Image (cartoon, rainbow, N blue to C red):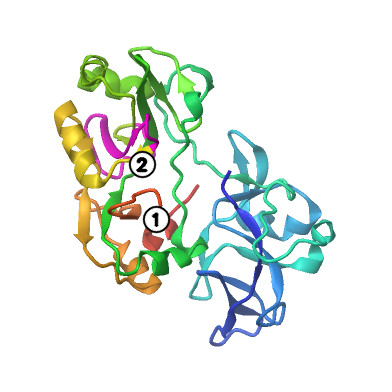
Amino acid sequence: MRSLVTVQRVKKITAIPESDFLEVVHVMGWQCVAKKGEFQEGDSGVYFEVDSFLPVEPRYEFLRNSSHRENFDNGEGFRIRTVRLRGQLSQGLMLPLPSFPELEGFSEGDDVTEKLRVKKWYVQETTTAGGTAIGGRPYGIQTSDEIRIQSATDLIERLSGRPYYITTKMDGTSGTVYCINGKIGCCSRNREIKDEADALYWMPVYKYGLREKLTALGKNIVLIGEICGPGIQRNKLRLPVLEWYVFDVIDWDTGHCIPYDKICEICSALGITVVPLEECGEKFAYSLEELLEKAKGNYPSGLDKEGIVIRDAKRPKTISFKVLNNDALLKEKD
């Protein structure tokens, strides 16, 4: 489960010009707008990341006018999203620790997501029938929710000087195809989906003939990609038909994530598309600020891209994170 809410310390505070009531607090690699004087540098607080979905209770009522939402899975609550306040980017919510007496004894870095009954906000991903769910993801196949770099800035230092690659984050819904011990199956982000020809999450198998190809390959393998096209999210790629862009291939017998060049070889043999490569290099040397700028830009359609994903070229899952396009986040309406 993603750590949406943690106890954190304020790293620094910067003023907002001509504002008597607001200032910017910096937490981990994030910045968010808070009441002026509510924090001092070094103070502890409770930090809610972007896409936190807070329960309805009195201490969050100040969010009602701006953030109250009905969620298709989790009922009503308050969604934390990227906004701009008084000209300042605000990503997340920082509240004083004393406002949460139930967190007595918790310290910096502790995950309090479940303690505070916070869920992850998911936009309804598709208007197309996804298929019939028949259970959780089998065999312990994990979801592919990359961590945002602002929540793990130490990854920049860990990747420094190492071989790396950067791919485009596609706008769609995560779809998994697996072949394990002769069984072919498909999953959404959280569920296994029944084999039906018109099920969205079985599209890759039927469109690319993967049942026969994976059987012939003779390997226990898991392929994870983004299903994009009409009826999914906003179809920012403006695709006329559904497509599948693979970003992870897992050798199930070893548990290893396969490097990008090998992913390309396997996908080429299977006749499927890989997520676009934006850059690769022998020595990673980007700062957080440079990565945030690099995440901006457009798809070939001219619409804002979702962002980028950066990985260690030799050990893809050891160091892996996403950087979202703030220009796109600010335009979100949901």
Dot 1 crowding, Cα within 10 Å, few <14, some 14–19, many 20+: some
In the rendered image, the residue lying farthest to the bottom is 18
Residue on which disc 1 sits: 319
Residue at 64% in and 62% down = 109
Residue 81 on the magenta segment: no
171 horizontally vs 20: left or right = left
How far apart, in angstroms, are the residues tagged by discs 1 and 2? 30 Å
Q: Indicate the quadrant where residue 43 lies.
A: bottom right
Q: Indicate the quadrant where residue 227 lies.
A: top left
Residue stretch rendered in magenta on the structure: 231-255
> Residue 237 location in percent, x, y?
26, 43
Looking at marks 1 and 2 on the same chain, the residue that comes earlier in the sequence is marked by 2
Above or below, comparing residue 219 to residue 247 in the picture: above
The N terminus appears in which quarter of the rendering?
top right
> Residue 229 location in percent, x, y?
29, 34
- Asked if one can make out residue 172 in the rendered structure from this viewpoint, the answer is no
Q: Which is closer to the viewer, label 1 or label 2?
A: 1
Q: Secondary structure at mark 2?
A: loop
